[in-house]
Amino acid sequence: MNKLFPTQEIGSLAKPKWRVKGYRGESLSKAEIVEAVKWGRKLRIENLDGLVKLLGERDSPSRRKAILEWSAKYAIRLFEKAGLDIIFDGEQWRSEMYEHVVRKTAGFKFLGYVKSFDYRYFNKAACIDKPKYVKPFYLDEFLFTRENTEKEVKVPFTGPYTLVDWTFNEYYEKRLSGEFRDFRMRKFEAKREFLFDLIKGVIRPEISKLVDSGAKWIQIDEPAATTNPTDEEMELFVESFNETVKGFHCTFSLHNCYSNYEVLAKYACELRNCSQLALEFANRDSRQTGIGNARTGYKEIKLFEDYGFHGNYGLGVIDVHTDFVEPPELVRDRILHAAKMIDDPSRIHVSTDCGLRTRTWEISFQKLTNMVLGAELTRKALE
Amino acid sequence: MIGCYLTGMLPRPKELIEITRAYERRKVDKNELEKSFRKATEKVIEAQMVAGFSYVTDGMLKWQDLLRPFTEGLSGIELGSLARWFNNNTFYRKPIIVNAIERRKNIVKDITYLEQMPKSFPWKAILPAPYTFVSISENRCYKNETEFMFDYAQIINEEIKSLAEAGFSYVQLSDPALVYEPLASSVKRDKLALANDALTIAVKGTPVKTCLQAFFGDFSRILPEALDFPVDHLGIDLYETNFEKLKEYSFEKGVALGLVDSRSSLVENQDELVTVAKELIDSIYRSKMSEVFICPNCDLEFLPWERAEEKMKVIGGVSKRLREEFYE
C-alpha cells in the first residue's frame, strides 16, 4: 500500500440482533427490525425492503444463508463508510473464532462448558481422532467479501497453535500412552503431533483454497501464542507458524493480544513470511494526548525493535474493551509516538487492539471513524 | 497408609452452570442460585464418597478463583482486573493490596457448606499458600514482600485454626507459584527459605494434618529444600515434574501424588498409574514408606463435571489397588 498509515480492523464486529436471532429462526421484535433498517439506511444498503421481507419469513436454510449475506454486507459497508483501507466482513459468518473451525472439522467432539472466569464458561472440545478437513470453513466468507468490496481484503484465520491449546488432546495422548514414562514429555510430544497433523491436514488445505481463489493477505490469529512462555513452547509456536505459511504466495501476518510481549518479542524475528505483527497497545496506554511519557502503553515496541524485528506493526490505537471513543488527536499521538520509536513510519499500519465484537455498532463505528481521522491527522503532521 | 482426595475446586455440574448463567442474565434470583449451589455441593460430596476418598471437601463450587474468598473477604484488598491463571485459558481477579491486610471474619469457614459435609467422614479444606498469594497479587502497600507474606501467613494460621474448630482435620495449601517459573532456569534458593518461613507461621500450633500442594510446575526444582517444609505432606504435579530428577531424592514426609491430569480430558489407564505410583514410591522411600495420597495434579475444575467424576473414580480405584499391593 502506497499511502502512509493504512487502516485496518482486526477481524470481528458484534453481530446485530437481527443476525443472531434471525439465524436461529427466532422471531424479531419491531425494534430489532427498525434497528436493521436504521443501520441499513445509514450505510446506504440497497433493497432494504428485501431484508425486512426476509426477516419476516419462516426459518429455512436459504433464509439463514441470506441473513449471513446481509449481515456480512452490513459489516463490509460499515468498515468502508468508516474509511478503512483494509477490510473483511466482521466475521459475521462465524459463531466464534474457535467453535467455527472446530465444528467444521472432523476429529473433534465438544465435551461441554468449562470455567473461563466467574460465571463465564466456554465450550471446550476434545480431539478424539486425527483431524480431518471436511469442507472449507473460511472460503465462502472470503469469496463473498471480495465480491462485495473494492477494498483490500485481509482474511482473519484462527491459528493452529491456539486451536490446539484450547482443545483437550485425547487422541494423541492416548496414542502415545505407554511410550513415555515421563508424563510431561508425553504431553508435549502429543501436543506437537496434534499441532502438525492439524496444520497439514486442515489448516494448510484451507489456506491453499483461499490462496487459489485469490486471497492476498491472511492474518493468523494466535491469542494463545504466549500462554506457555517456556522456550520449548515458544519454539513450538514459531515452528507452527512457519509450517502454516510455508510456500504460499500470499501475505501473512500475526495477530496476538493481551499477552506477554516480552516473550513474543524474543521470538518475533524467527517468524518467517510474517509481514505484520498486529498487537494490542491502546488497552495499556493512557488517554492523555502527547507523545513521549504519556504513551505508557507503547513501550514494548522497543523490545521488538531491540530483538531486531523489521516487519510492519498493526499498531493497536483503539481499545476494544471500553466505550471511550478515542479522539483523532489521541490516535494521532499514538501513531506519532510509535513512528518515532521505530524511525520508519512506513512500517505502521493503524489498527484496533483486537476485534470489536464486544462493542455496539454505534461505538465501533465512532471508534473506527476516529481511527481513520487520526491516521489522516498523522499524515498531515508529518508533511 | 495410602489414601486419596481432591486437591482443588471441582467443576460445576451442568445444571449449576446453567443456573449461574441465568443468574448473570438476571433470569433467576439469589435464592435460587444459592439453592442450586447447595444441591450441587451435595452431589459432588456424594461423588467423593462413592469414589472411596479418604477425606472429602465441599468441592469449592462457589469459589470464583483460588484467591477470591480472600481477595473479597480480607480488608485492605481491592478486586483487580482479570489476569491469566498461570498457563491456562482461565482467569482470576488480581488482588490489589491497598492497605495492610486484616482478617475480620472467618473466610473459608463462611464460604464452606458445612451442613452438607458428611458427619462421620474426615474433612479436608484447601487454601491459597502464602507464597502464591503474595506473588500473584499487586502490592501497593507493603514496603517489602516478606512483611506482606508474613501478614498473610498469620491470617492463614487463624484460618486453619478456625477450620480445625469447625471439624476439618486436613488442610492443603495450594502453591502453584512456587514451582511455576517458566522463564527462570532454576528456582532461587532464598525464595524457598522465605516460603519455608511463611509456612512455619501459617501452620504453627494447628491441630490438623497439612499439605503443601505445588502444581503447574516441576516439583524437582524445589528439592531438596521442600523436604524441610513444616508440613506433613508434599503434593506433586506429576504431569509437570521430571520423574528421573524426582527419584534422585529420598523422602521421609508423606506425599500427595498428582497422578491424574486435571488438564486433560483423557481418562487415565489405572494399570499404568499403579505401575508409575509403585515405581515412584519405591524410589523416593528408601528406608520407610510414609503416608501416600493419590490425587489429581491440580483442581479438576478444568474439566466438564462428567469427566471429573470419571477421574475421581480412577483416583479411588488406583488408591485401592495400591493399598492391596503394599499391604496384602
Image (cartoon, coloured by chain):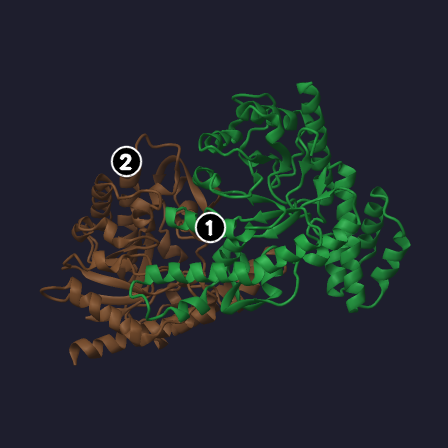
Q: Which residue is drawn at 21% across and 79% down?
A: B324
Of residues B323 and A196, the one nearer the viewer is A196
Q: In which quarter of the image is residue B166?
A: bottom left
Residue B231 in the image: x percent, y percent?
Answer: 20, 54
Hue used for the chain lettered A: green
Mark 2, secondary structure of its residue: helix
Quadrant occupied by the N terminus of chain A: top right
The residue positioned 77% from the left and 62% from the top of the image is A65
Q: Position of residue B68 (x, y in %)?
A: 42, 49
Q: Which chain carries label 2?
A: B
- The residue type indicated by label 2 comes to Glu
Q: Residue furthest toward the bottom?
A: B328
The label shown at residue A199 is none
Q: In which quadrant will I find the C terminus of chain A?
A: top right
In this orientation, does residue B52 appear? no
Where is A378 relative to A158, above or below? above
Horizontal and vertical percent position of residue B264: 42, 64
Which of the chains bears the disc numbered 1? A
Residue picked out by circle 2: B147
Q: Mark 1 points at which residue?
A: A239
Q: Is mark 1 on a helix, strand or loop?
A: helix
Would residue B279 be seen by someone viewing this image from the given angle?
Answer: yes
Q: Which residue is drawn at 35% across and 43% down?
A: B183
- Colour of chain B in the rendered structure image: brown
